[in-house]
Structure formats: structure tokens, C-alpha cells
Image: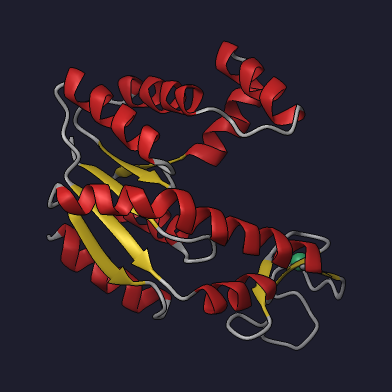
Amino acid sequence: MTFIILLGPPGCGKGTQARTIQKERGIVHLSTGEMLREEVAAESAVGKRAKRIIESGMFVADDLIIELVANRIKKLDSQVGVNLDGFPRTLPQAKALDKFVESNQLRIDKVIEFVADDNAMLKRISGRYSCLTCGEGYHQDFDKPKLAGVCDNCGSTNFQCRTDDTVAITRSRLKDYHLRTEPVITYYSGKDILYKINGMLSLEEVKQQIDKVLGP
Ligand SMILES: [Zn+2]
């Protein structure tokens, strides 16, 4: 099983790249955020616990997240690869993941860090907006509709902009990333499985760097 991890600040585009990797290489993209939402919707045991924690406004604890990830990986065919997007987020999560990996005769092959500038990430996120009718996403600098003010997808002229709230939330997530996730990066760097790529380039250029890291 190919086992890779993508780490990077919010807004760096790692989710998009993870979906491309899945499409081209069959390496399954696991996003802990999506997995949590699925478990909550399915009302599984983990989902019910997570729902209580989320509703009480607390962070979902490391042990619950690791249980979620471990259960999902165990269900996968051993032939396919797995790509963790945004996990581990903290050093205790990274150490717990190592324990799981070792006890299941797996191995983390490569950790790819998207290196990006905070201000650029803020600009990217605050420029995003979407169609109110169909949900199609746009960006005021990087991804405008072909005809100004008209949705490419459905022709609607109603859009929803990101609010100041989004910027404030992003700021706090960036701070959280530096505080909690940077130790994870140092941890993997010490294991010699860390690859840094420039997350500030275009989607295609970032993809090329990832292809170089992953090989043919
Ligand atoms: Zn639309």
C-alpha cells in the first residue's frame, strides 16, 4: 500500500491536488473533515461521539480522529494507496498514527508539505465566492466567470461572497497550523520522509512538483 500524507496551511490547495492524485493514481484521498461529516451523517458510534463534541464547541480529540482514520484505512483494499489530507494535525496525532501504522505492518512512504505564505493564503481564501444557485466556486483574481457576473455553470447572476468572518476564521486556522502542525513537519523531517513543495505556484505547477516527488 502506498501511504502518503499531504500537509499545508488552509487555502494551499492540497484537497484539490489530493483529488487529482486519486483520479490519476488510484490513491484514495482521505480528508478527516469529510470523514467526520460522513460519520455524523451516518450516525455511527464514532459519529455520535463526534457530534456531541462538535456541538459543545470543543475540538475533536486526537484519539477519536485516529480511530476514525484507522477504521477507514483497515477497510481499504491493501492494493490501493492512501493519501491523508490534513492529518495528522498535531504531534500526538502523528505519534498515534505511527503506532497504528507499525501495528498493521504499514509504512508511511512520503509526507508532502505545501509551503505557502500566510498573506497569500488569506488573499486566496478571502477572494473566493460562489454561485448562490448551483454552488459553483469562483475567485475574484484567479478564477472568474467567463462572462463577468454570470455563472458559467447555470447562468445565474446571484453570487455569495466570503465575509470578513471567513478571513478571521482563516487567520485563526493559520495561527493554529503554525502552532500545532509545524511540530508534525519537524517530526517527519527527522524521519527523512518529508518533501517540501512550493504551494504558491499554479495548480499545474504544484501538480508537477507532486508528480516529481511521487515518481512514475
Ligand atoms: Zn451557478
Query: Is residue 197 among what the camera can see?
Result: yes
- In the image, 184 versus 36, the foreground residue is 184
Q: Say which of 44 and 147 sits in front.
A: 44
Query: Horizontal and vertical percent for residue 199?
Result: 38, 72
Figure quadrant of residue 34: top right
Residue 129, position as x, y percentages in the image: 73, 70
Image position of 24 with respect to 145: above or below: above
Against 175, is 76 above or below? above
Whether 206 is drawn above or below 7: the answer is: below
Name the residue nearer the viewer: 139 or 63.
63
Tell me the residue at 34%/72% (across/down): 206
Instruction: Residue 15: give x, y in percent of width and height.
Output: 46, 55
Instruction: Give the side of residue 141 with respect to residue 91, left or right.
Output: right
Whereabouts is ligand 1, in terms of quadrant? bottom right
Give the quadrant of the C terminus.
Answer: bottom left
The answer to whether residue 173 is left or right of residue 86 is: right
Residue appearing at x 14%, y 22% in the figure: 105
Query: What residue is drawn where x is 73% and y is 87%?
Result: 147
Where residue 131 sits, quadrant-wise, is bottom right
Residue 110 % position (x, y)? 20, 50
